Amino acid sequence: MRGLLLCCLVGLASKFSWIQPHLNPKKTYEYKYEGVVNFGLGMPNLAESGARITCKIKIIGVSAQTFILQVSDLAFKEFNGFPGKNTFNASPKLTQSIAAQFVKPFTFDYIGGHVSNIRASADISDTIVNIVRGILGLFQVTVKTTQTIYELEETGIHGMCPSNYATEVNAETKDMTITQVVDVGNCREKAVMYRGMATAVFDQVSKQRGESVISTVRYIYTVKPTAEGGLITKAHGLEQQHFSPFNVKGGSFQMLAMKEIVLLSVNDTERAFVFGPMESKGNLVYKFVNAEANVPILMQSLDNPVPKAIELIKHLAEVNRYQIDSTTSEDTIKLYQLLRVIPYEGLEVMWKQFAANDEQRRWFLDMTVEVNDARILKFFQMRFQAGDVSANEALQAILLVMNHLQPIPDLVEMAKMFLNIPFCKSNIYLWHAVVLSYGSLVYKHCTYYTPCPVAAVQPLLDMAVEGLRNGTEADMVIALKALGNAGHPGSIKTIMRFLPGVAASPVNLPPRVLSAAVQSMRLIAARDPRSVQDITMILFLQKNLPAEIRMMAFMILFDTKPSMALVSTVTVHLQEEKDLHVISFAYSYFKSVARSSTPNNHFLSTACNVAVKILAPKFGRLSYHYSKATRMDWFNDDFLIGTAAEVFMLRNATNIFPAEIIMKGKFYFIGRILQLLELGIHADGLKELLGAGIPSFKGDLSVSDFQAVLNVLQNWEILPNDKPVLSAYTRTFGQEWFFADITKDTIQNIFRAVSPSTGKESPLWAVIENLKKGVSWHWTKPYLIFEVRYFQATTLGLPLEISKYYQTINGITVNAKAAVNPPLTDRLGQLLTSEISLETDGFIGYTKDFWVFYGINTELFQCGSEFKSKIPIAIPWNFAAKINVREMKFELDFPPCKKEFELFSVSSNVYAVSRNTEDPALTKMTPIMPTAIDSNDEVVHKGPTAVGPESDQVLTPNTWHPRSNMCAESKIYGAGLCVESELRREYYHEEYPLYYFLGYTHMALKVIPVQAIKAVDKIHFEVNASPSKHLVSTRQLLETVRRLSKVFGYSCNVVICAPALPQASEDLITGLNSTPESVLNIKALAMSGNQKPEGYDAAFYYTPEANIHNAQMIVSQVGEDTNWKMCLMLLPANSLRRLKPAHIGWGAECQSYEMSMASATAHQPGSKPTLKAKVQWTKIPETMAEMGTRIESFIPGMAFYLGFYEQHERNAKQEVSVSVVAASADSVDVKIKFPEYTVYRQAFPVPLPPGCFQEFQHLRNTTMDSFGCT
């Protein structure tokens, strides 16, 4: 029986052995190969780019499992243009260059349909070997003869990925067709590589809402049965990928990669093949090439790079000497690429050439930081040890060197040396930069290497322990901040030693150190959330700790994204909490997160919502006097984009000033969270100075409030010498890079420098003396803001790259010369009685370039889609100024506008690009949308229909080409301001957000010369703060301007709601009981030789009598035959005029048009604080009325969206009134009356400032003449 069964199994095995893929070692197989890759949008009439490789391959047996691969008749072609109109073009030079590397043969092992152990000559580049991997991938197939549908995980060019197979046998030919689908989205080991994304936190929930990259890979094999086994006669591979900067569901760029082999012949091998020495290149998995020098957005010859880089630096320094030359800003990327291929010795040669030239030296140091490997570390090690760079130069350089360095183990180890170079400790800010940036390097290193070795963070741990042992506050703070940057889980035990209740032994450290220790766990929260939760929970529950430390621990606890159970535990403890600051902070945090819509808070917001409902009855009415956490955010699933802003105000019961203020801004982008900016202020010393309150401080930001603050600050001498008055820090992308302490000595030095009694020892005196001689200062700063790159293998063995580059050049130039009359002799106070003249010209601005590349990028060629934008801002100036402090007079003279110049512009386009290394000058960049669009402005045209490439769906393109040029011209001053714009769009699906951004875009803001009424010699601007015979105080002047500006601000926000033309008139108020006096004159005049000037004159008036708060402003047009004026009068508030405290009229002698407005606040016994405001109009221009009517049409919809109710009723004509009643500490009742209807809402949530209405508790039937709480 056993024998019979064995015979059956042998027979069954032999029946199917003929189909297993096999190569005969005694045969020579010849195939035709073709590989094509294409990039575009997959829509008709839009440009595409691509590349095609064709060749013949021979496979020759060497042994039973080893075979030779020979490539011949190779041809490389490029495509760039429009499908159907353009064709692939041959690239003879590149073909020759690639073919030269294919002259030598390759070998590989082949067993049972699996390729392994690829070998080649040592001088063959990895790029060529990867192309060979793409060819051999068509021979990699697994056949299961007992199943027709099966799944397995196997190695391929994309990595170790799951595959789904389906087989079918042709009944006639007995050929087997095998279909393989590779799930490249779920590879266990995927051939991908990231660069520059370490600080962009991955967000898994966001990825579940949509993808920005989706790939599919399919292979079809035809296997012919033979006596020796299955022979692959044809194989076809297809990879399709969709990419969008947003959600791919809303339109996408597309990559189509196709490869195919067809069997041409099978012959006996006539002779043994001889080949030279070879080395192993690995298996089929794609091997990434060091792509640091392969910048995807350009291609240039990298031969002999040193002289090219030297000339480029000289050129950039020269053309940007006075202002930024936006036409050359892209050359910085060329320079980065050249510097990355220059050896260390070349950097030293360049340094010697540039060191003596300030401009070229600065450009070299700013640009060379992007070398990003061991060469740059060695270069700056030599500079620091030799001391031939300044501390300022070293600080700027080390920040960028460390943050842009490749975070590989060897470089992390090498970077430790900067912690021990004496020069780094010669300047406190340089030392901070070195330590903090090393911590940032460790963080990035740990992102790519898990588990991260403790050795990387050990120097920082040693610094922290040493600082704690010595009790040195400054050393402890800097070490903890660096540990916070590193975010290494191995530092938890060291951090615990600084935390009371957690440390093994009791600790008593200043709040500043405790705050740094708690914040040092902010990035560990994501890497070891359980440990951080345990520690922060202990800290939060310690009621003897300062309130601000407990609140800080609460913040870090919730950075770990705690579970519902842990949030419930915190909520239970809060119900028994006695500190109202802690309760208020936690409750406001819960309330803010409960409303969050960002993916990372998807689960936490639910838990917080439950917590709010539990705590609201008891703590929902806490006022804004207490500590608060505020968060505002939004997220769009179609764009996969969102933003968030957070403000944390940490107070305690003993001080009016917050102990800590933290502001954060985050950006959510295609599955990543960028912590763009964080600012923090720690005010321990200031708390001691201000104490529990400021005498005479009302909180309305009036002049008296500022005076009250100044009075307190004058007591700065009582502050301790060993404690900072104020500490501030800033973090970018989650990494702290700068912090500074303002100490008692700092304040003392400032007071001494600006004191009127100070003499020639003041640094300000030296500045004035230099200005008298004339100064010229210029500074530029090129900076690669980010370089984010993503690499992925394709089925062809070519690297797909998605990259974003953001580069800026900032610049400022100042030329100035001053005169002081009479000149200073012995003290600075003489400036207050002198006339100061200043003549200056200069420039300030920047140019920012941004690229997004999606395509194939190798050292041989590039093809793909490229988005490119440029944003230059250029603000030149040229004026003469005179300042007379004693007479309170200020004058400015500007030259007339003679030529057009651009202040600001935005331009962008999307291109199909093709470049190759053999002909870099023949780069092709075809706008993805045809430039010849025949359309009128702002008209959407529907073009001829087209059939989609992958379906029979009929597509109708929409073409949109709006153009505009709007100018506001002044014939008085001979200048105008113009806004011009042009957009070109073509799209097939209106709902696709990607197409909003594709196409040509240009917008610009320009200043242009205009034909003036009279020839303008100069434009004269003058401010005279004492035109009357009675000199006024600064407080009186500021109070007048403040009150008038509040009327203007109110008018601007309310008058646009006027819905109808004027129908009635009111009596103008013609005078007051007392005569107003002019306190301020402002003139803006166009001067024309001896002729009468043209322009405008504004005069401010103030009534000086006691208890009268009357202010007026009159603006008059200056010139011949003109009587236009605008009059604004702010009337005293009393029972007779409580509804009309302000009046404005304009036109001929202020009589043509008029409006009045009023506001009042009141709080009577038994009633709630109330604010009422009203605007009335008698006559207004027709354009203003039409604008009000148009805006009125949107009000009902906006009111409904905001939860308001609408009631149709006839109210007073030509009047809009508003009533706001404080319903609670965080809500108000609002009613707005328009002539035809009323909108209202009760309990409208709004965060009221502390004491806004409470300060009126003492009022009884009293009105106030201020417009709301300030």
Image: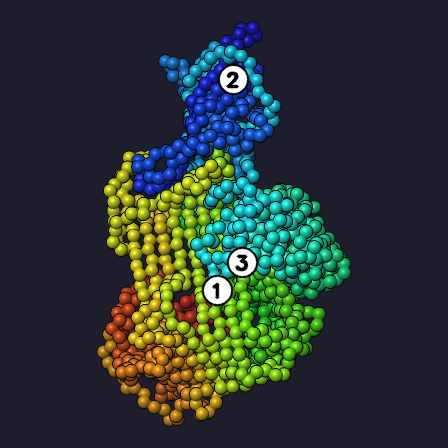
Residue 468 found in image quarter: bottom right
Question: Given the image, on which type of amino acid does mark 1 rest?
Answer: Ile
Which mark, residue 781? 3
How far apart, in angstroms, are the residues tagged by discs 3 and 1?
12 Å
Element carrying mark 2: strand
Regarding residue 318, the answer to whether it shows in the image is yes
Q: Which residue is mark 2?
A: 60
Asked if residue 54 is positioned above or below residue 1050 in the image, the reply reads above
- Of callouts 3 and 2, which one flags the residue occurring earlier in the amino acid sequence? 2
Do callouts 2 and 1 mark residues in contact (Cβ within 8 Å)? Answer: no
**Circle 1 residues within 10 Å: few <14, some 14–19, many ≥20:** many
Element carrying mark 3: strand
Query: Is 1046 on the left-hand or right-hand side of 317?
Result: left
Regarding residue 668, the answer to whether it shows in the image is no
How far apart, in angstroms, are the residues tagged by discs 2 and 1?
68 Å
Which mark, residue 844? 1
Question: Given the image, on which type of amino acid does mark 2 rest?
Answer: Ile
Q: Nearer the viewer, residue 746 or 31?
A: 31
> Residue at (46%, 87%) from the top-left corner?
1026
Asked if residue 640 is positioned above or below residue 1119 in the image, the reply reads above
Q: Nearer the viewer, residue 306 or 1038?
A: 306
How far apart, in angstroms, are the residues tagged by discs 3 and 2?
59 Å
Please state the horizontal and vertical placement of residue 213, each as a whole percent of the image. 45, 41
Asked if residue 675 is positioned above or below residue 1232 in the image, the reply reads above
Q: Nearer the viewer, residue 1257 or 176?
A: 176
